[in-house]
């Protein structure tokens, strides 16, 4: 857990990255490092500074699936379009682990990358970054994901400003 000052420093780095990206880069921005609670605090602070509300994706996706009787609702891109306000230029997504559920039959990174083509996506990455790879769960686990970290802008909130890749 990091103190409030470091949360604000990380928050400022996130905002600087988002503003520097503009609409020119269509990659999602992932916050990594530290514990999930701290990532949530940084994500929330950045959202508030930009006048946005962070979206608890786990709760929103679960609710959307429960209330919909259509098979189409299980298509994550369609669901995400219904969850993120259509006029939002930036969406802050927290608790995205629901995207890794095997029953959704989707690749979480593909879903977020596709959403990032329409707006800036900033999310708390629930996995880890190792050797230039975004990882979630271990090999052999049904929720395992192992993708090239270059598919996203990764901000390690525990590192110095030079840690943005």
Image (cartoon, rainbow, N blue to C red):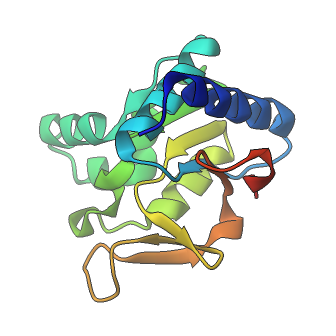
Above-or-below relation of 15 to 122: above
The residue positioned 36% from the left and 37% from the top of the image is 37
Relative to 73, is 39 on the left or the right? right
Work out whether residue 122 can be spotted.
yes
Looking at the rendering, which quadrant does residue 95 occupy? top left
The residue positioned 44% from the left and 61% from the top of the image is 108
Relative to 56, is 50 on the left or the right? right
Relative to 30, is 68 on the left or the right? left
The residue positioned 51% from the left and 53% from the top of the image is 33
Relative to 143, is 12 on the left or the right? right
Position of the C terminus, as image quadrant, is bottom right
Closest to the observer, 71 or 20 = 20
* Rendered location of residue 160, percent (x, y): 73, 47
Position of the N terminus, as image quadrant, is top left
Residue at far bottom of view: 140
* Rendered location of residue 86, percent (x, y): 55, 24
* Rendered location of residue 22, percent (x, y): 83, 34
Looking at the rendering, which quadrant does residue 110 occupy? bottom right
Looking at the rendering, which quadrant does residue 136 occupy? bottom left
Closest to the observer, 2 or 82 = 2
Q: How many numbered marks appear? A: 0
* Rendered location of residue 146, percent (x, y): 49, 78
Closest to the observer, 76 or 43 = 43
Work out whether residue 95 can be spotted.
no
Above-or-below relation of 49 to 80: above
């Amino acid at each position: 857990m990091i103190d409030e000052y470091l949360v604000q420093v990380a928050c400022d780095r996130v905002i600087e990255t988002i503003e520097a990206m503009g609409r020119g880069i269509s990659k999602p921005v992932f916050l990594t490092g530290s514990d999930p609670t701290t990532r949530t605090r940084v994500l929330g602070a950045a959202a508030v500074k930009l006048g946005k509300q962070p979206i608890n994706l786990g709760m929103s996706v679960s609710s959307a699936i429960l209330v919909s009787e259509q098979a189409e609702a299980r298509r994550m891109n369609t669901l995400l379009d219904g969850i993120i306000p259509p006029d939002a230029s930036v969406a802050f997504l927290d608790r995205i682990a629901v995207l890794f559920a095997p029953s959704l039959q989707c690749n979480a990174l593909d879903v977020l990358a596709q959403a990032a083509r329409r707006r800036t996506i900033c999310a708390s990455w629930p996995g880890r970054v190792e050797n230039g790879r975004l990882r979630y769960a271990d090999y052999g686990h049904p929720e395992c994901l192992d993708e090239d970290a270059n598919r996203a802008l990764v901000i390690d909130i525990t590192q110095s400003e030079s840690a943005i890749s």
